[in-house]
Amino acid sequence: MKKIIVKENGTLLNYLYNADLPYSKSKLKSLLKHRCISINGRTTTQFNDAVDVNDEITILEYNAKLDTPLDIIYEDQNILVINKPNGLLSVPTERQNELSALDYVKDYIKGSVYVIHRLDKFTSGVMIFAKNPQTKNFFQKDWQKKAPERQYVAIVEGRIEKEKDTISSYLKESKDLYMYSSDEGKYAVTHYEMIASNSKYSALLVKLETGRRNQIRVHMADIKHPIVGDSKYGSTTNPIRRLALHAYRVTIKNPVNNRAMTFTAKVPQDFTRLVSLSNLDNQRLNSF
């Protein structure tokens, strides 16, 4: 890893090319393409980004290990399963120019890797990658049938009256990436059951029947119990400074023999801390 303090204003690629570094212009472009260059901690792929005096440029060789270690749940010749931390993108986006889980997995494998499904940036938990095109195609043909069990633990605002319920609606995406229930959207079904509840919060085990973008978050908001920390969908509290949604368990079919494979990511400590601080009965939550 190299760190450079900018001494004169300019554009990124030109500045680096003239900075007496052991890289050709093509090598620098390759480092940019592989998201290995950042300005003041912000990853960039744009060679013409402006740099100003005292900016810090960081260059990470893409054949070197990234700093954040992967929490690997399982690995074989076809799949890699990780416990994605809260705050990490699943895949790179144009809007949020920063490292993603996909970047870290590529760095670990040192080869091709394919995203099978995604988690929201602020959702932690089980995330599965394919290590070859055949496995990717196997899961992408019908992900819902190939992953028959997808369970989440969520902590929502307020006391939910029903111990168990099913929420269904048609979800549509607005131009600013906001999901909402609409007759014109795609059908979405969410099941939940109570883990613990009091006047402040309810801890839920949530099971997905479908897998729409932000599905659990929208459905919880629809019943007036937004997920803790989810200001986008109406939450007014954020005591643990994160979205209280965790992909707890995923069961998939083995791409080789179709046998069930179940992967579990233990509920994060900040969930149990919130439960304890709010005097929720955490005996059952501790089993997750």
Image: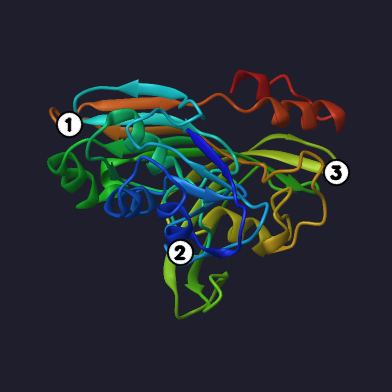
Which is more N-terminal, label 1 or label 3?
3
- The residue type indicated by label 3 comes to Lys
Front-lying residue, 226 or 59 = 59
Residue bearing the label numbered 1: 258
Quadrant in the picture for residue 36: top left
**Foreground label between 2 and 1:** 2
Mark 2 residue crowding within 10 angstroms, few (<14) / some (14–19) / many (20+): few
Residue bearing the label numbered 3: 200
Q: Position of residue 7 (x, y in %)?
A: 62, 53
15 shown above or below 265:
below
User: Would residue 120 be seen by someone viewing this image from the given angle?
Assistant: no
Quadrant in the picture for residue 164: top right
Element marked by disc 3: loop
Label 2 vs label 1: CA separation? 36 Å
Element marked by disc 1: loop
Q: Position of residue 131 (x, y in %)?
A: 22, 35
- The residue type indicated by label 1 comes to Asn
Residue at (63% x, 28% y) in the render: 268
Label 3 vs label 1: CA separation? 43 Å
- The residue type indicated by label 2 comes to Glu
Residue bearing the label numbered 2: 94
Which is more N-terminal, label 1 or label 2?
2
The colouring scheme, among rainbow, by chain, secondary structure or one colour, is rainbow
Element marked by disc 2: loop
Question: Image check: 41 left or right of 79?
Answer: right
